[in-house]
């Protein structure tokens, strides 16, 4: 299995392209690639702050001209698809096919491989993207991630204002530390081809948690008696729209809260790729407690 402790084996002058490079997960991937001495090219919608060793490309991952520019001299891509529709991904896949890099795609453990249609639009677009990449013959390494711990950063304004988090009560999942997902991604991106473990990896944390459980862990880290309040769909919708979230995303989140089944699956795939067990959400909460104060 690849080991993140190994140094990069990229060819001189080659680059690793990271899409969504300024997001919660993307920036962790960039940071780790830099630590390995890899040349990183970041694709972001807005001009990022300058970072040594990171070459920025500004534009939309759905724009084939932008993708074509970003892929020049690139031999590996960490791909995050940010849209709820895969129709505009066909041009992206065509550009990837032409450039023929190694593709590591971030997907979701919520996919049901036995179902023709998925539970909600968020899961459906991931299944569609996987099908597109495989159908093009790209042989992607797919990292299906469970709910990222960093998603709870959206609760910070509420916790700075009081001791209650209110929102949609989405089904319990094995919440995974985004740092573990980043380590797994980098292990694959830097792997030598003869050691590369092609195929599918299910990245989970070590325990299944509800939103109330996550709030309780944050409370322990902050030493405050926090509570979670589940909101009915209509109230959650109005609040998310008032906060400026796009309506398609709001409707997709509502659908996920109603239709997505609970998952009790826990895997050791993080350890298989990184050489160490996945961290707990409780540890993540302690490490990030200052962000909620």
Image (cartoon, rainbow, N blue to C red):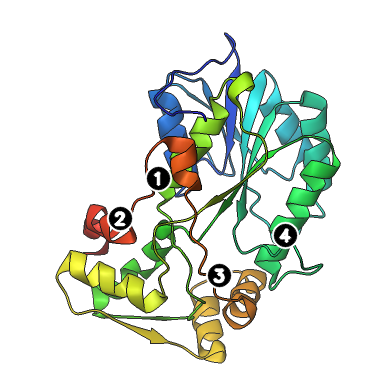
**Marks 4 and 2 in Cβ contact (< 8 Å):** no
| Sequence order check, earlier mark of 3 and 2 | 3
Of circles 1 and 3, the one toward us is 1
Marks 4/2: CA distance?
28 Å
Work out whether residue 168 or residue 144 is closer to the camera in this orientation and state it: 144
Please tell me how many numbered marks the rendered image carries.
4
Which comes sooner in the sequence, label 4 or label 2? 4
On screen, residue 292 versus residue 59, left or right, reads left
Q: Is there a contact, CB below 8 Å, between mark 1 and mark 4?
A: no
Percent position of residue 190, x then y: 53, 25
Assess whether mark 2 and mark 3 are in contact (beta carbons under 8 angstroms).
no
Vertical relation: 79 (above or below) 231: above
Q: CA distance from mark 1 to mark 2?
A: 9 Å
In the rendering, which numbered label is found on residue 245? 3
Q: Identify the residue under disc 2.
A: 284
Label 1: how many residues lie within 10 Å, few (<14), some (14-19) or many (20+)? many
Residue 5 visible to an observer of this rendering: yes
Seen from the viewer's position, the closer of residues 93 and 247 is 93
Please give left or right for residue 132 compared with residue 33 in the image.
right
Q: Which mark is residue 179?
A: 1
Task: Specify which label sits upstream in the sequence, 1 or 2.
Answer: 1
* Residue 277 left/right relative to 67: left
How far apart are the two marked residues, 3 and 4, measured between alpha carbons?
Answer: 19 Å
Q: Report helix, strand or loop for mark 4.
A: helix
Q: What residue is rendered at 22% in x and 57% in y? A: 286
């Amino acid at each position: 299995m690849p080991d993140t402790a190994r140094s990069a084996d990229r060819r001189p002058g080659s680059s690793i392209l990271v899409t969504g490079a300024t997001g919660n997960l993307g920036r962790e991937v960039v940071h780790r690639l830099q630590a390995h001495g890899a040349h990183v090219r970041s694709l972001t919608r807005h001009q990022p702050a300058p970072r040594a060793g990171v070459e920025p490309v500004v534009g939309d991952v759905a724009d084939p001209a932008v993708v074509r520019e970003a892929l020049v001299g690139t031999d590996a891509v960490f791909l995050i698809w940010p849209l709820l529709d895969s129709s505009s991904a066909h041009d992206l896949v065509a550009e990837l096919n032409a450039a023929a890099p190694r593709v590591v795609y971030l997907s979701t453990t919520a996919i049901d491989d036995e179902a023709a249609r998925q539970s909600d639009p968020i899961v459906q677009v991931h299944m569609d993207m996987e099908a597109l990449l495989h159908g093009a013959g790209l042989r992607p390494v797919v990292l299906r991630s469970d709910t990222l711990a960093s998603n709870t950063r959206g609760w910070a304004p509420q916790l700075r204002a009081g001791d209650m988090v209110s929102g949609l009560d989405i089904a319990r999942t094995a919440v995974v530390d985004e740092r573990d997902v980043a380590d797994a991604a980098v292990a694959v991106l830097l792997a030598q081809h003869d050691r590369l473990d092609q195929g599918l990896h299910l990245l989970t944390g070590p325990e299944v948690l509800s939103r109330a459980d996550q709030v309780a862990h944050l409370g322990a880290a902050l030493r405050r008696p926090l509570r979670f309040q589940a909101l009915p769909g209509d109230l959650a919708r109005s609040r998310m729209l008032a906060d400026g979230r796009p309506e398609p995303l709001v409707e997709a989140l509502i659908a996920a809260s109603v239709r997505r089944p609970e998952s009790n699956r826990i895997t050791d795939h993080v350890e298989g790729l990184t050489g160490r067990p996945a961290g707990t959400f409780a540890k993540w909460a302690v490490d990030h407690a200052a962000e909620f104060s």
